[in-house]
Amino acid sequence: MAGFARLIEYLWKYRRRYLLGGLCLVATTSLLMVVPWWVRGAIDVIERGDPDSELGGYALLIALAAAGGGLLRGVSRSIIFNAGRSVEYDIRNDLFAHLEKLPLGYYQSQRTGDLMSRAVNDINAIRMLLGPGFLNLVNTPLYLVYAAVFMLAMNARLTLAVGACLMLLAVVFGRFRGRIRRASLRVQRQMSRMSAHVQENLSGMHVVKAYVQAEPQTARFTDLNGEYQARSMDLARVRGLINPMMVALHGFTMLVVLWYGGWLIMREQTGVADLVAFILYLNVLAWPMAAFGWMISLLERGRAAMERLEEIFAVEPSIADPESPVALADKERGLEFEHVSFAYDGTGNGEAVLRDISFEVPPGRKVAIVGRTGSGKSTLTHLIPRLHDVTSGTIRLGGVDIRSLSLEELRGVIGYAPQDPFLFSTSIQENLKFGDAGATEQEVRRVLDVADLESEVEVFPEGLDTRVGERGITLSGGQKQRATLARAILADPEVLILDDCLSSVDSQTERRILHGFESALKGKTCIIVSHRMAVIKEADEILVLEDGRIVERGDHDTLLRADGVYARMYRRQQMSDELDEI
């Protein structure tokens, strides 16, 4: 029911359009349903042998009603269908905005293809519900009410006979409604699985090909597609049963009217004009009755779709703005970690990834973090822009708890170059300007020079306007890392986080980057994560992580003299570099 409550909120926003469309529907139905009544009057005129002028009047009324009904029908459909499109637009925008607010942990447990299916297919189902579905939901009862009023005015007994036949409609509706909803939900879920499989294969096509898995993945898709076809056929069979039953019900009702109406005429308890009007009313009701099954299908598919979307809307962002954000006043913004611990379950009951981390990064200084794979280095960097929230302890920026700052202000002063580089499927220039859309081409080329990427960009077919493909697939790993580094520097943040962003770069390129790196980092509060000693040895302080704890700290020379974990890592790095040069 929560899904429908949300849907009503969207409908309320466009209530004037739906009201106007509903009034046009009432007017359309009124004009169409009065036509059989006027036909009855015309037949009475013919039977009485009245002057032709009265018959001509009925003919004119019928023609005007048909023309007016046709015009209003088009207007009503335009208004209601456009309102449905507007609701679709709002839901899709709100869903995307909600997805943007959810934390990284949510996406680690979801499949992208499933989310995409909900954002496209399920919202389309809702649009059909709020467009054609709403129209038929209003139209069908109107037709039935009008028919009942006019029929009762002509002959109550014949109307009761028709009503008894139409009561079977409620029985059919009750029998199939639940089955359609369950079948629709199964179809939509299977579409999500299939979409997820396609998305993963397209994104990881290089892996599929490298491991010669094209045929197995195709076979897997065939199985998923077959299951989707089977579930779609189940839904089609259920839907397919309804329309023939509605048509059969209409035919049976017509038979009852002809038999019972004829019997009443022979006993002079009704007239031929009444019987003709009854038949015309049943013909008018033929389409609403036939469309009833389709309307049920739209209703249940829309309901199932809203249930699936509500599963996403119901997820509360665990990381959100505080009720009363505090403004950052201090322009010299250092970082401070105070007894910070973190576990991915968010409760502290699970295994901690970081344990009792405390250190400071004074304004304009550089702190480097090193450690073995899995020691918690990247997780630590994720806590600063609140991609995850600390389980316990406090992180301060400029003396202010980062949880007291608005996310926009906090993240607005932080530049982040991740270990796993991500580029959008746009041009190189647009990717670099992602954090600063107003940057000039000169500024873009400056950061490209810092990242030692300018000469390589010049070789590309369209230079800065070269499209990099999905996730930057047309660039090498090192080029992608340098592009994300340039993007972080171009944003000119006050706090810069570099998470092993040169791991895919060769040693010669690394030396060229480091040569011009100091000027780019000057005056910035900087945290550098790396396993490359050339990157970190000039840091003001180096932290060594082991199993989520700081086991050593100090500058490069101090840690070498201590002959501990850092010294061993440094010696191994030196040996590796010497072997690379041989």
Image: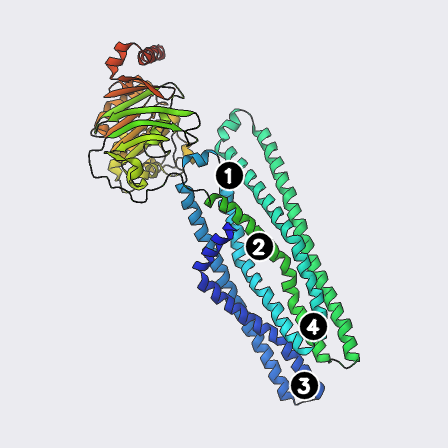
What residue does disc 3 label? 45
Reading the chain from its start, which is encountered first: label 3 or label 1? Answer: 3
Reading the chain from its start, which is encountered first: label 3 or label 2? Answer: 3
Crowding near the residue tagged with mark 4, few <14, some 14–19, many ≥20 C-alpha atoms within 10 Å: many
The vertical placement of 372 against 240, above or below, is above
- In this view, the mark in front (4 or 1): 4
- In this view, the mark in front (3 or 2): 2
As measured in the structure, the alpha-carbon distance from the residue carrying label 3 to the one carrying label 4 is 23 Å
Taking the image as drawn, is residue 451 in sight? no
Horizontally, residue 328 falls left or right of residue 150, namely left
Which image quadrant: the C terminus?
A: top left
Whether residues under marks 3 and 2 lie with C-beta atoms below 8 angstroms apart, the answer is: no
What residue does disc 2 label? 299
**Near-viewer residue (481 or 126):** 126
**Near-viewer residue (422 or 562):** 562
Whether residues under marks 3 and 1 lie with C-beta atoms below 8 angstroms apart, the answer is: no
As measured in the structure, the alpha-carbon distance from the residue carrying label 2 to the one carrying label 1 is 25 Å
The vertical placement of 31 against 364, above or below, is below
Horizontally, residue 247 falls left or right of residue 380, namely right
What residue does disc 4 label? 159
Q: Amino acid at mark 2?
A: Leu
Q: Amino acid at mark 1?
A: Gly
As measured in the structure, the alpha-carbon distance from the residue carrying label 3 to the one carrying label 2 is 45 Å
What residue does disc 1 label? 113
Reading the chain from its start, which is encountered first: label 2 or label 1? Answer: 1
